Each structure stands twice: as structure tokens, then as C-alpha cells.
Amino acid sequence: MKECEVYRNLKDGIVQCLACHHFCTVRPGESGKCGIRRNFRGKLYLAVYGKAAAVHIDPIEKKPLYHFLPGEGILSIGTVGCNFRCQFCQNWEISQLREFNVDPITGETDTFIGYDWPPEKLVETAERYGVRLLAYTYNEPTVWIEYAHDTAYLAVRKGFRNVFVSSGFETHHSWKYMEGLLHGINIDLKGFTEKFYRDITGTRLKPVLENIEYLGSRIWPSIWLEVTTLIIEGYNDSEDELRGIAKFLASINPDIPWHITAAHPDYKMLHINYTSHETLIKAYEIGKEEGLKFVYVGNVYDPERSSTYCPRCGALLIKREWYRVVEMWKKRGECHKCGERVPGVWE
């Protein structure tokens, strides 16, 4: 447990968390909506600091990031807790764990919330396994941003790079706090209506759109941005909604890669169908029609629509079959047929 840094004091021991757009007002003895930022004696503490519930080495493509050092391994870290309550969450066992007691003196909990993984150990592990990338993922990294910050700081000192896999609910306080430490981010744009966000995720759409616009147009390409939409049939798969997402992204920057991925029954949405391949192809075609240069189909076997092509001449540049990557170009980031420069982080 460690005192948070992204918050402010109010009065009578009440504090306000500034990490995400819930801007939770937290009274002594209570926690924010994420369940892991807790007020003890008038100070906000991160209950999961140094406690990782999941640590794995994944392919970078699993995040998914397709224009960021393809084929590289990435040390992926997550904790318990989340500021979203997505009914379809595929990591719900850890992300939706919020109800546990914490000893305000020792930081001990009455429920297992993770193994001891202090920032130093995470970076040493990446170095030991020859991995130069770290991902803050599985649950929303914004709610454990101090833990992510300290790990990312040590990683940068080693010459490593850091990426967020996020729902895009960060505040400008969080972006400023992570300044100079983040190199890439994949934001989940879960739908395109306030109703979907309110009913299915327990949050709001507007801050997510503002963050995508901020990252996509103001500081591009200081932090490389890709966007993912999990398509849930009957909920966010209408043509109007998909076209709205594609048009929005293209209006910011047509170079933003858009990943459209298949959902499966999970957590509180066991009644939904597996997303059909036909629905994903429809979304893919809509993205292309609206001017996006890089649209990718995921969570189904579709080498054609998960590969990267030159936006000018159509040459195959990166062939993907699931997480198997074959680079066709002679020089990363440059089409071997016409010389077109392809946006991304290649070196």
C-alpha cells in the first residue's frame, strides 16, 4: 500500500481522486468506484501498490498493437479493481474484485489480491527475459496509476518502452503524471452511444472520445495510439454506430489503426452470441469506406483482414495468422513496392 499522488484534499478528511473522470469524492474509511483507491485518515492510498494479480509475457499483437514493434514480446501486468463495470468483461475475475478489507496500518488484506511484484522486480524480470516492452493491462491501469508510473519510470531508465491498454477514462492530471513515460496506448472505444456506456459499462462516452481526440490529434505521435471496439451483436453493431465510430476516428487521423474484435459470452452477458465473422467483415468494410487506412479484424481467424497493407499501392507489408507475424517489407515502416512511409513505431 502506498499513498496516491493523483488526488487532492478537500475538507474534514475528505479527498477527491483525480485519476479518472469519475472524480470520486472519498470519505475516510471509504474507497473510490474502483475499490482500490482508499481514504485512510484523510489521505488517499493505493491498496494494490506492488501487488500484481496477473503477470505474463504476451506478444505485442495481443494488446492489440499492430503498428508498434511487431513480433516483440511484452511483459503484461494487471491488478484487481477497475473504474468500469463492463457486463461483458473478459478479465472480470480480477477487474471486478473490489470488496475486500485493508488494514490501514499494515496494508494487509483479508482477501488475496495479488502477488508481491514491486516495480523493481517487474523491470528486472523484463530484463532477465530479454523483453524491452511493458504493458499495463488486464484491468484499467488508470486506477493503479502510481504503481504503473513507478514501474514505467524504472523501465524508461533501462531503455524500455511502456504501453497502456486502457478504456480511455484518464484525466489530464493522469496524462501529465505519466508524461514522458508512455510510448503507446490502445484505447477501447466500447460503443458510440451514451446509453451503451451508461447501461453496459457504468461510465460515460464523452471523456473517452475526448481522450481519443487528445491523443490522436494534439500530441500525436508522441504516444502511439490504436483503438479497439469489441463488437457485441444486438448492442453496438448497428451500421449507424459502426459508421459513427469509423467517421469519428477518420476525422481525427485516418492513420489511427482500428481493431474490430469478436465478443464471446462472459461475466454478466452469458446470453450473447459469439460475434459472427460476417458482422466483423461488415465493420471492416465500413471502416475502409469512411477513410480509415488500417482496419483489423481480431479474435477470429482472418489472415487477410488482420494483415497490414500499403495504403498507397496495396502491397502486403505484414502478414499475420493469429499471433504469428511475417514481415514482408525490406525496411520496417517503408513499402518495398512504392516506398510509401507507413505510420507506426517500427524501431
Image: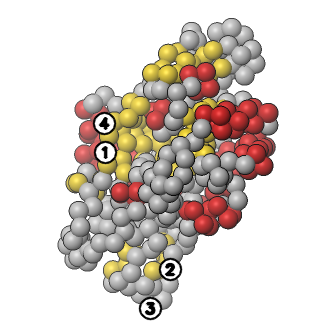
How far apart are labels 2 and 4 at the CA level?
A: 36 Å
Q: Nearer the viewer, mark 1 or mark 2?
A: 1
Q: Residue at x 31, y 45 (%)?
A: 55
Query: Label 1 amino acid?
Result: Val
Q: Residue at x 72, y 45 (%)?
A: 242
Determine which of the numbered discs, if any, sits on residue 126 in the image: 4
Q: Residues within 10 Å of mark 1 (few under 14, many from 20)?
A: some
Determine which of the numbered discs, if any, sits on residue 12 in the image: 3
Q: Is residue 25 above or below residue 204?
A: below
Q: Which numbered disc flags the more N-terminal residue, 2 or 3?
A: 3
Q: Are marks 1 and 4 in contact (CB under 8 Å)?
A: no
Q: Nearer the viewer, mark 3 or mark 1?
A: 1
Question: Which residue corresponds to mark 1?
Answer: 55
How far apart are labels 3 and 4 at the CA level?
A: 43 Å
Question: Which residue corresponds to mark 2?
Answer: 25
Query: Label 4 amino acid?
Result: Ala
Query: Label 2 amino acid?
Result: Thr
